[in-house]
Amino acid sequence: MSVSRYWREAKSRYMLQGSKCGRCNRLFFPKRSVCPSCKSLSINNIDNFNLSGNGVIDAFTYVHEGLTGFEMQIPYVIAMIKLEEGISITAQVVDIDDNTKVYIGMPVRMVFRKIGEDGKSGMIYYGYKFSPDMANFG
Ligand SMILES: [Zn+2]
């Protein structure tokens, strides 16, 4: 990833910022500039929208063969998370001492973690992952 692209996307990565169609109120993550529901009528009518980062696990899988740079983390959990705003997002679930404890319906919240680094540029990338939401266990 280039440094300029990283900074262009930084707000989305750090704040879980999506967008909202001002015409039909549909939410998007990642951001879109044209709403697929309203199409051209939504141009200039899309605003940034900060998502809460709270959600529940809708589906999940265990990754046993890590991507390059992620070998140290295997096995890890990748989940489809349904945010309270109704948007689904795919992300890694971290901070679980035992992967078998993950279940569908598990409350999670977004956390910022190191995603990777680029040895050539010296850049360390951070982004969103999800962690069990202890406040909502009950
Ligand atoms: Zn729309």
Image (cartoon, helix red, strand yellow):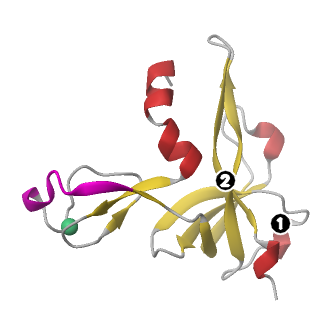
Q: Earlier in the sequence, mark 1 or mark 2?
A: 1
Give the residue number, with chain letter if any, for mark 1.
99
Q: Amino acid at mark 1?
A: Asn
Compare residues 49 and 73 and report the one nearer the observer: 49
Residue 122: image location, x then y, percent: 68, 14
- Classify residue 39 as left or right of residue 60: left
Give the residue number, with chain letter if any, for mark 2.
129
Compare residues 60 and 22 and report the one nearer the observer: 22
**Could you say which quadrant of the image residue 98 lies in?**
bottom right
Q: Residue at x 28, y 72 (%)?
A: 25
Q: Residue furthest bottom?
A: 138
**Could you say which quadrant of the image residue 133 lies in?**
bottom right
- Classify residue 81 as left or right of residue 105: left
Residue 34: image location, x then y, percent: 20, 54
Identify the magenta region: 40-48
Spatial separation of the CA atoms under disc 1 and disc 2 = 15 Å
